[in-house]
Amino acid sequence: MTLKECKKEEKIDREFQKKFKFEGSINVLTQMMVDPAATEKRGGAKNLPLRRGEILDVIQFTNQEQILCRNRQRRYGYVPRAVMLPL
């Protein structure tokens, strides 16, 4: 990873912490897959766009309905628990 890529990732992580009011370091708890039978969603202000069968990094289990996740493009957002499957 080059210095430029590293700085870009750090900037993305800082923006995430500010947007979601996330304290501390970003640790991946587990990985989960979006249900292949789920409908694809575009995402919104704080919601992550969903693609069938996509594997997401779980950052935080926020409540009974949503999980805070990160996708392969290092985009962060909330995902409904109903569409997530354990690996």
Image: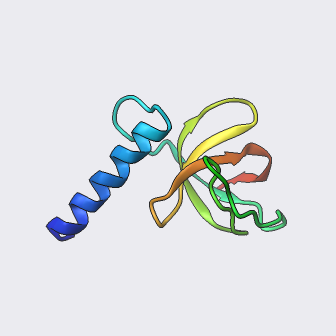
Residue 56 location in percent, x, y? 57, 57
Q: Residue at x 19, y 67 (%)?
A: 4
Left or right of 7? Residue 69 is right
Q: Quick one: quadrant of the N terminus?
A: bottom left
Residue 27 location in percent, x, y? 40, 41
Residue situated furthest front in the rendering? 45
Q: Is residue 66 above or below residue 86?
A: above
Classify residue 54 by image quadrant.
bottom right
Left or right of 18? Residue 83 is right
Q: Residue at x 68, y 29 (%)?
A: 63
Q: Quick one: quadrant of the C terminus?
A: bottom right
* Front residue of this view, candidates 86 and 65: 65
Classify residue 78 by image quadrant.
top right
Q: Residue at x 83, y 65 (%)?
A: 39
Q: Is residue 27 visible?
A: no
Q: Is residue 25 above or below residue 55?
A: above
Q: Is residue 30 above or below residue 38?
A: above
Q: Residue at x 77, y 53 (%)?
A: 83
Classify residue 64 by image quadrant.
top right
* Front residue of this view, candidates 22 and 19: 19
Residue 52 location in percent, x, y? 73, 69
Q: Is residue 58 visible?
A: yes
